[in-house]
Each structure stands twice: as structure tokens, then as C-alpha cells.
């Protein structure tokens, strides 16, 4: 492993994203627009629905967007021959994976800074916990999305196939993360499933931050998300082979 | 006696269900060596084995005196896959700067590589907007970074116009003159004349090996395409 190469990969990925205005918009603008839409939708309804759903949405953006962007970029990297070339060079697999994780982790930090600024500053979302912890949750979340994206790109041969993993990997997590129905209130089986899905803990962490702000519970959730992210990075590394059939 | 750069012995590679290389043996030494054979005969598979990207079943592959795929070879071989293997959304200079950082070579070698493939005028252009020939030269420039001892180029001239092809072959010879061994694959037989040495390949085997003159002489033909056909008829007794 080499810091120089990890940074080279991260810098190169960021440069590619910067050049791609659509992806940049999806990363930075769309989350702000969606969170505003959510606020607007609930505006005339009684109760504090925005405070209930907002944090969950903030937790989902980094995960979903990074999953999509990473799975498509690494798939391109596999089909264009650049990955094959890189792996014949003095590049460690970990350099490659950490480079991606670093780039998308940074983007996630910027993304959630913007989304949180809009939510708290403009839309009046109340955050009881510390705002920088929100950033930590978002980055852990993004690294998880990146790692899973890297992983699924190994099982796709076209960009369309890569995108098809969205409904399989992401939608169930959105449904079961406790946003629509509290996890404790779900049928036992679904609650058990929810307990092993990483997004549930990301959403938990965000909701705790906005709500009661029990720092211990927040860190516990963050730690669980981070473990999932590390495990997926490990699995991703296993799919990255210098020698392929 | 020239130094062997590549030594392959009884290499067996199975891809999917097929035995693509059923036990190939060959040597490559300095100079420009052409690996010629029809599409699907296993050129890419062989080249991937040389750079350590191919899972092999048995046999030995030695490159620059080390087993293929050794970590110590990773900055001594320049490899261009059949796709140009560069990032389409980065400029020529950005691509080279990135690969230079991965290889740990300085910026000066970036300028040298750009100059070698004559892309100075396009260095700040995004690769995806270059012509096919310029794009493959950008891919080649990456392989030149750090002055490798061996260049493995998979069909670098395919689909290019005759002028560009001639320019590229001249470049391969300049690189070889500077001391590197260059292995170039092609399925176009008329590129044979431009090589010091030829390896003719068919169905995962080497069917002829020698200079273009030697091969023509041995087969009593006037061009390599005829020589290839002659050799095929020889190895395939009439049913
Ligand atoms: N990934 C793969 N899986 C299974 N078979 C493959 C794969 N890639 C190539 N092949 C088969 O291996 C044979 C040789 O392919 P290749 O080495 O690409 O030939 P060439 O480069 O000479 O055109 C072909 O028959 C091809 O169908
Ligand atoms: Mg090929």
C-alpha cells in the first residue's frame, strides 16, 4: 500500500467527477432540492413530519448516490481496460479501493454539509446533537455506498446491469430502515432483517442526532455503519483480482 | 545470441470451457516482434499471460528473467490492452500525470511520452474527443512512461489509416532502437513486413517463428499472408 498511489487515485476520481457536470449536480444539488421538496410537501400538514422524515433522507443521499456513481465508474474502469492496466502496475488493490473511498468520502462530506445547511438554515430542521457528527455519519454512509458499489460492479458487465442492482440492494434498505414504520413496530421477521441492514443504522444515527442526541447511541450506530463499510471494502478487495479468467 | 526477454514454456490457459492456449511455447528477444494471427486465435490471452493479468492453468512464463506477474516487473513492462485503457473524461496530460504518479515517475517523463507519440498539440484535450488514432496514441504514451524494458501492445494499429499506421510502426522501431523489446499483436497480415521477427499464431499455437524473410523462404511464398495459408494447409492434412 502506498499513500502516494491512494492519493493519486482519489485525485483522479475527483477530477473526473468535476468534469462531469451531471454527476456533480446529482451529488451536490439534487439532495438539496429533494430535501426542500420534502419540507414543502409536509408544510401544510400538522405535526412535525419534516423533523421525522428529514434526517432519514439526509442519511440516504450519501449512500444511494455514492452507490450509483461508484458502481458505474468502476464498471467503466473494468471495461475500458484501465483497471487491467492499473493492476499490472505497482498499484495495490487497497490503494485503488481506499482512493475511491477517500474521494467519495470527501464528496459526501461536501454533499451533507450543503444538504444540512439547507435543512437547518433554510428549512428549520432542528438538530440537537453536534452538526459535525452529522458529517461523520454522512461520510461513513458514503463509504458504505462506495464499497457496495465497487462490490456489485464486479457482477455487472454493462452500466445498465450495474444500475439494476439499485432496486435489489438499495430499495429494500429504504423500505426497512425504520423511516416509514419504526423498526420495533415491524413484524418480527422484518425487524430481524432490518437489524442486519446497514442503512437502518445510518438512519438511526441521523434520527438520534436530530432528536434526543444521545451521543453514545449515535457513536454506536456510526460504528456499526463503519463496520459494514469495512466489511464491504474487504469483499470489494476480494473481487479485485490481478489475474482474471 | 540475443538476450531472451520473454520465455514461455508449455503454457496452458483455459477460458470458460475452452482451452484457448493448449500448451504454447515461444521466445521473444529485443527488437520489434509481431504476434500475428486471426481474431480469436489467442493473442490477447497470451499477452495477458505475459503481463500477469491472465489466470493460467499450467506451464511457465518468464519475462525479463522473472516469473510473469512478479511485483518487481510491474514498473518494467508497458502494456496497452486492446481498448486504449485511458480515461476518456480526462485530458491527455491528466491521464499521463495520473499514471506517472502511480508509477512514481517524474513530470519530465510525461512530456517525453507526449512528445514520443506526437500529441503535444492535443495534450490539453479530453481523450474522449480525440480521433481513434490519437486516442490509441494516448494509450501508448501511458505505456511509455518510466521507459519500460518491454512493451506489450495489443492490436495498437487496428482500424487506423495507413499514414497513422506507418507512423506508429516507426515509433515502435524508435523505441526498440532505444533498447526496449516491443511485442505487437495484429490480425492484419500485411503488418508483418514491418517487424524484425514474427510469431505466426493459429488456434492457440505458434505455427511459424522467424524473420519475415526466413518465413517466406521456408514456405516458398512471396508474402506472409500466403505463407500463413501455406502453413495452415501443411498442419491440416486434407480430410
Ligand atoms: N473472458 C473470456 N471468457 C471465455 N472465453 C474467452 C474470454 N475472452 C476470450 N475468450 C475466448 O478465447 C479465445 C481467444 O481470445 P483472444 O485471446 O481474445 O483472441 P485474439 O486476441 O487473438 O482475438 C476466443 O475464442 C475467445 O472467444
Ligand atoms: Mg485480441
Image: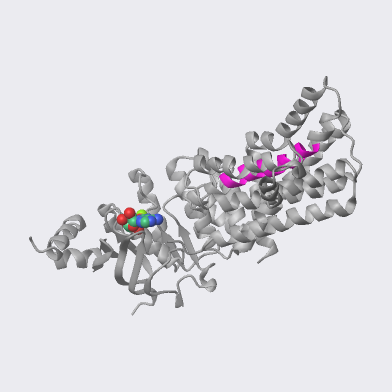
Q: What percent of the width, then of the height, locates residue B41?
A: 29, 58
Seen as rendered, the residue at the extreme front is A188
Which quarter of the rendering shows the C terminus of chain B? bottom left
The magenta stretch is A55-72
Which residue occupies the foreground of this view, B9 or B210? B9
Tell me how many marks there are. Answer: 0
**Any part of residue B125 in sight:** no
Q: Can the viewer see residue B168? A: yes
Can you give x and y, in whole percent of width and height, for residue A236 in the image? 59, 57
Q: Name the spot of residue B102 as percent of width and height, x first.
A: 61, 60
Looking at this view, name the residue that lies furthest to the top. Answer: A44
Residue displayed at 79% across by 46% down: A204
Q: Quadrant of residue A166?
A: top right
Q: Quadrant of ligand 1?
A: bottom left
The percent position of residue B238, horizontal first and vertical second, equals 7, 61
Front position in the image: B70 or A229: A229
Look at the image and say whether residue A132 sits in the magenta stretch: no
Q: Quadrant of the N terminus of chain B?
A: bottom left
Residue B147 against residue A101 in the figure, above or below: below
Indicate the quadrant where residue B44 lies: bottom left
Q: Is B125 on the left-hand or right-hand side of B164?
A: right
Task: Please tell me whether residue A166 is drawn above or below residue A46 in the rendered image.
Answer: below
Please say whether residue A66 is one of the residues in the magenta stretch: yes
Q: Residue at x 53, y 61 (%)?
A: A87
Tell me the colour scheme of the image: one colour
Magenta: main secondary structure equals helix
Position of B152 compared to B199: left or right? right
The residue sitting at 35% across, 43% down in the picture is B161
Q: Determine the residue positioned at 67% across, 35% down.
A: A26
Q: Is residue A110 left or right of residue B212?
A: right
Q: Quadrant of residue B196?
A: bottom left
Amino acid at each position: 500500500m502506498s499513500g502516494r498511489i491512494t492519493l493519486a487515485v482519489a485525485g483522479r476520481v475527483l477530477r473526473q467527477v468535476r468534469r462531469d457536470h451531471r454527476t456533480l449536480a446529482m451529488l451536490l444539488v439534487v439532495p438539496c432540492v429533494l430535501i426542500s421538496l420534502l419540507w414543502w410537501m409536509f408544510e401544510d400538514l400538522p405535526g412535525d413530519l419534516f423533523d421525522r422524515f428529514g434526517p432519514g433522507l439526509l442519511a440516504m443521499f450519501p449512500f444511494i448516490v455514492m452507490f450509483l456513481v461508484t458502481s458505474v465508474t468502476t464498471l467503466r474502469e473494468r471495461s475500458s481496460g484501465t483497471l487491467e492496466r492499473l493492476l499490472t502496475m505497482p498499484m495495490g488493490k487497497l490503494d485503488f479501493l481506499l482512493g475511491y473511498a477517500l474521494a467519495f468520502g470527501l464528496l459526501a462530506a461536501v454533499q451533507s454539509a450543503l444538504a444540512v445547511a439547507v435543512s437547518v438554515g433554510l428549512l428549520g430542521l432542528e438538530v440537537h446533537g453536534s452538526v459535525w457528527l452529522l458529517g461523520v455519519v454522512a461520510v461513513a454512509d458514503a463509504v458504505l455506498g462506495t464499497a457496495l458499489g465497487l462490490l456489485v460492479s464486479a457482477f455487472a458487465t454493462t452500466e445498465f446491469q450495474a444500475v439494476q442492482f439499485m432496486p435489489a440492494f438499495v430499495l429494500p434498505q429504504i423500505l426497512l430502515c425504520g423511516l416509514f414504520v419504526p423498526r420495533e413496530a415491524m413484524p418480527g421477521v422484518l425487524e430481524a432483517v432490518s437489524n442486519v441492514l446497514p442503512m437502518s443504522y445510518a438512519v438511526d444515527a441521523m434520527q438520534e442526532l436530530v432528536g434526543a442526541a444521545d451521543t453514545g447511541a449515535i457513536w454506536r450506530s456510526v460504528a456499526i455503519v463503519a463496520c459494514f463499510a469495512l466489511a464491504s471494502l474487504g469483499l470489494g478487495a476480494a473481487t479485485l483480482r490481478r489475474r482474471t479468467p | 545470441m540475443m538476450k531472451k526477454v520473454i520465455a514461455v514454456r508449455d503454457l496452458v490457459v483455459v477460458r470458460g470451457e475452452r482451452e484457448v492456449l493448449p500448451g504454447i511455447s515461444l521466445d521473444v528477444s529485443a527488437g520489434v516482434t509481431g504476434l500475428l494471427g486471426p481474431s480469436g486465435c489467442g493473442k490477447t490471452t497470451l499477452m495477458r499471460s505475459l503481463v500477469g493479468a491472465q489466470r493460467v492453468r499450467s506451464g511457465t512464463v518468464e519475462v525479463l528473467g522473472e516469473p510473469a506477474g512478479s511485483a518487481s516487473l510491474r514498473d518494467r513492462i508497458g502494456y496497452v490492452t486492446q481498448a486504449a485503457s485511458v480515461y476518456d473524461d480526462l485530458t491527455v496530460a491528466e491521464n499521463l500525470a495520473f499514471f506517472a504518479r502511480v508509477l512514481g515517475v517524474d513530470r519530465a517523463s510525461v512530456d517525453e511520452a507526449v512528445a514520443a507519440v506526437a500529441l503535444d498539440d492535443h495534450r490539453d484535450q479530453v481523450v474522449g474527443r480525440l480521433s481513434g488514432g490519437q486516442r490509441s496514441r494516448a494509450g501508448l504514451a501511458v505505456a511509455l512512461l518510466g521507459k519500460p524494458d518491454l512493451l506489450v501492445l495489443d492490436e495498437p494499429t487496428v482500424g487506423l489509416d495507413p499514414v497513422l499506421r506507418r507512423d506508429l510502426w516507426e515509433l515502435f522501431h524508435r523505441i526498440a532502437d532505444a533498447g526496449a523489446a516491443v511485442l505487437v499483436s495484429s490480425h492484419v497480415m500485411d503488418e508483418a513486413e514491418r517487424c524484425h521477427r514474427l510469431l505466426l499464431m493459429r488456434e492457440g499455437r505458434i505455427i511459424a517463428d522467424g524473420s519475415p524473410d526466413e518465413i517466406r523462404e521456408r514456405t516458398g511464398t512471396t508474402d506472409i499472408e500466403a505463407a500463413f495459408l501455406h502453413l495452415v494447409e501443411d498442419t491440416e492434412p486434407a480430410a
